[in-house]
Image (cartoon, coloured by chain):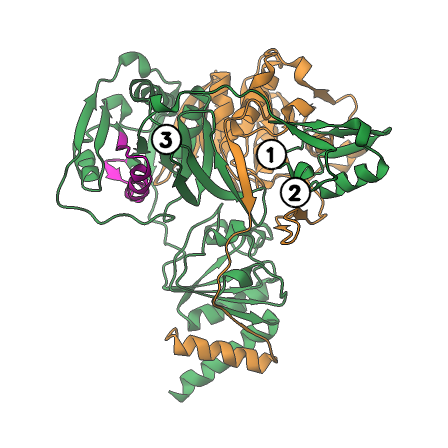
């Protein structure tokens, strides 16, 4: 669908209204001519909320595809060094829910070397079929080789939807596969639903703001998406296995690679920043190193780890490992207290499943208050020192 | 070495809301800026340029206002800039964006290396780099923290999920650079005075400059995904809001923590 301007209805006032209404500054008015520039995201607010009839939506003939030719839901198994990443199980649980809507199979694609053990393990989490491509040249992740294997799998099986865990390797693989098939790919979905017509409904934060977008692929198959670790819950491991393994041949011609691995070193098990039961999260409201010291004092008293929003990282107050949210970590602590966090959805997607959320902010309109179980409207510079004082006093009295 | 660095202009704020009455997006009028992750890629490109007596071309896709980030890149040390801008490119998803960028890169002779940041702070997908590499039919690697020039190829280090990998990659290739890998330089005042509007350095290309003249591969028409609707995240219904003096607030907070056995 495209947008069409009815120029006969345009005057200066109409133009002004439209310019004001467009959230992306995509509407321009020069020399009495209204135009839409490349910043347009097709949100169609100008059609729905603008002066009636000035900008219209014109339906274009969409190329249709036969969706019945594309069946079943595939989870890409994230396996490194024969360890199945637990996100694989989380995705299997969600895939099963989705598959039930349209009575489809849940399939898994595993690529690597010596995969029998991993593939068998995956069968215990409710996969109907696990397709295994094994070769010694596939032992380590190589994006070109893996994409070639993936291409074969898609051509042979025509899956309707493919779900990837948003690990560093899959974030390289999924886009290459999507581009090869000119398919849609939605990153970091926070919710997935299935329509009767097999359209996968993908929900994610969008437009760099406190907004969720619901995204579909109406005319394309397969439908690809990634989901971050700990967004969905893994199903219980079942003792019984009903699915089966399918071994697929690997052709030498797929194994050409322009990357030559010199060395792979396992990361030192970096101490997990969020290793405590509770978390104190700080946002833009925290301004200086002295504030950080105060926050750490409180964290010590509450057995909490310290996390933060992106602006705190950008200000250089904490290092990136502390970041919570869509470009940081997803956390599920028992308690999270946020200080001076406004609550942009980029942050809240990373912590909204905390068991108990307390928010302290001096802006009554801060969106974090919509999420909090307990909201304190106050100045963090007053609340934090006072709270520290009370807790210390209490501890002395015990 | 002929180096291309892809950069994007992003909103200076993430504070966007939906007006509950009209359903219209409200965006704070805070200035747009260069995507912070692109600064690391640009710095990496400029360092390679200095080592190899190469050339850095920055490219960006966006509305005319995105010229600002290309100028900033020129002031930092890039030699040339290309703005990919056309109404026909509007409404592009990852697929159409990557295809358009790949077509723009194909208009440049003898590209050795394409660098990108790891993601943008507005779209936040981190997928455009890899898709662009696929459309250019060149190898790519993500989360790259270091690059060293070797004969006819590059040695690089990548930050995988559980390991750090060192590898060689042949040219031409595309590398998505990790964040915080270097200290991006500031724009130079001297270059700013010297190049000012960058009229000679920056050119704008549009649909008519692309080799593939099939309109259905660009913009909204070339996009596979479609935004069905946008909405505000759900709100919690049961919640307690407290106001009061500092002593009272701290006391109330303490009481809740104690009742719920967090202390």
Residue B160 drawn above or below residue A60: below
Q: Would you say the residues marked 2 and 3 are in contact, meaning their CB atoms lie under 8 Å apart?
A: no
Measure the alpha-carbon separation of dots 2 and 1: 21 Å
Specify start and end residues of the magenta stretch as a single range: A80-109
Q: How many marks?
A: 3
What residue is drawn where x is 62% and y is 71%?
A379
Of residues A52 and B22, the one nearer the viewer is A52
- Subunit that carries the residue with mark 3: A
Residue receiving disc 2? B11
Q: Secondary structure at mark 2?
A: loop
Measure the alpha-carbon separation of dots 2 and 3: 32 Å
Dot 2 alpha-carbon crowd within 10 angstroms: few under 14, some 14 to 19, many 20 or more: many
Of residues A323 and B15, the one nearer the viewer is B15
Q: Which mark is residue A161?
A: 3
- Subunit that carries the residue with mark 2: B
Q: Position of residue A96 (x, y in %)?
A: 28, 40
Chain B color in figure: orange
Nearest to N terminus: mark 2 or mark 1: 2
Residue B139 drawn above or below residue A309: above
């Amino acid at each position: 669908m495209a947008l069409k301007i009815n120029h006969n209805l345009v005057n200066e006032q109409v133009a002004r209204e439209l310019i004001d209404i467009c959230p992306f500054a995509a509407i321009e008015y020069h020399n009495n001519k209204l135009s839409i520039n490349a910043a347009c995201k097709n949100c169609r607010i100008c059609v729905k909320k603008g002066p009636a009839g000035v900008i219209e939506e014109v339906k274009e003939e969409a190329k249709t595809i036969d969706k019945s030719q594309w069946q079943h839901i595939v989870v890409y198994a994230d396996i490194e060094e024969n360890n199945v990443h637990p996100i694989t199980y989380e995705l299997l649980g969600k895939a099963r829910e989705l598959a039930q809507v349209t009575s489809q199979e849940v399939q898994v694609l595993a690529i690597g070397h010596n995969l029998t053990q991993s593939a068998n393990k995956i069968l215990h989490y409710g996969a109907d079929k696990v397709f295994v491509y094994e070769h010694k040249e596939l032992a380590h992740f190589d994006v070109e080789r893996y994409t070639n294997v993936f291409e074969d799998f898609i051509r042979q099986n025509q899956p309707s939807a493919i779900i990837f865990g948003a690990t560093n390797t899959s974030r390289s693989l999924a886009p290459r596969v999507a581009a090869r098939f000119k398919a849609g790919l939605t990153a970091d979905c926070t919710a997935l639903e299935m329509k009767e017509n097999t359209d996968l409904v993908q929900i994610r934060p969008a437009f760099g703001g406190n907004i969720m977008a619901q995204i579909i692929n109406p005319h394309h198959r397969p439908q690809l998406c990634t989901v971050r670790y700990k967004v969905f819950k893994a199903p219980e491991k079942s003792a019984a296995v009903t699915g089966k393994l399918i071994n697929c041949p690997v052709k030498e011609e797929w194994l050409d690679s322009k990357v030559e691995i010199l060395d792979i070193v396992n990361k030192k098990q970096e101490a997990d920043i969020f290793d405590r039961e509770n978390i104190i999260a700080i946002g833009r409201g925290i301004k200086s190193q002295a504030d950080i010291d105060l926050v750490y004092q409180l964290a010590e008293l509450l057995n909490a780890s310290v996390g933060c929003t992106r602006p705190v990282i950008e200000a250089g107050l904490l290092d990136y490992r502390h970041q919570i949210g869509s470009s940081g970590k997803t956390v599920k602590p028992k308690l999270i207290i946020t200080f001076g966090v406004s609550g942009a959805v980029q942050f809240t997607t990373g912590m909204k499943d905390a068991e108990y959320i307390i928010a302290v902010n001096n802006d009554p309109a801060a969106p974090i208050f919509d999420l909090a179980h307990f909201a304190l409207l106050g100045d963090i510079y007053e609340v934090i020192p006072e709270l520290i004082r009370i807790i210390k006093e209490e501890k002395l009295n015990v | 070495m002929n180096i291309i660095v892809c950069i994007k202009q992003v909103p200076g704020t993430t504070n966007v809301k939906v007006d509950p009455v009209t359903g219209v997006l409200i965006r704070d009028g805070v200035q747009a800026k260069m995507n912070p992750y692109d600064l690391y890629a640009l710095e990496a490109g400029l360092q390679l340029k200095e080592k190899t007596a190469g050339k850095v071309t920055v490219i960006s896709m966006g509305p005319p206002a995105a010229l600002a980030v290309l100028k900033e890149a020129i002031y930092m040390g890039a030699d040339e800039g290309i703005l990919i801008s056309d109404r026909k490119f509007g409404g592009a998803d990852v697929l159409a964006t990557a295809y358009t960028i790949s077509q723009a890169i194909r208009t440049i002779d003898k590209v050795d290396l394409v660098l990108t940041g790891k993601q943008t702070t507005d779209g936040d997908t981190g997928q455009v780099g890899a898709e662009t590499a696929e459309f250019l039919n060149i190898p790519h690697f993500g989360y790259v923290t270091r690059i060293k020039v070797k004969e006819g190829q590059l040695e690089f280090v990548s930050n995988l999920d559980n390991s750090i990998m060192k590898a060689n990659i042949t040219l031409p290739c595309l590398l998505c650079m990790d964040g915080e890998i270097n200290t991006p330089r500031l724009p130079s005042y001297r270059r700013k005075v010297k190049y000012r509007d960058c009229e000679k350095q920056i050119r704008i290309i549009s649909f008519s400059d692309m080799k593939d003249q099939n309109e259905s591969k660009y913009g909204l028409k070339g996009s596979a995904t479609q935004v069905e609707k946008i909405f505000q995240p759900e709100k919690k219904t049961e919640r307690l809001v407290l106001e009061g003096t500092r002593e009272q607030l701290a006391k109330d907070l303490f009481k809740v923590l104690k009742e719920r056995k967090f202390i």
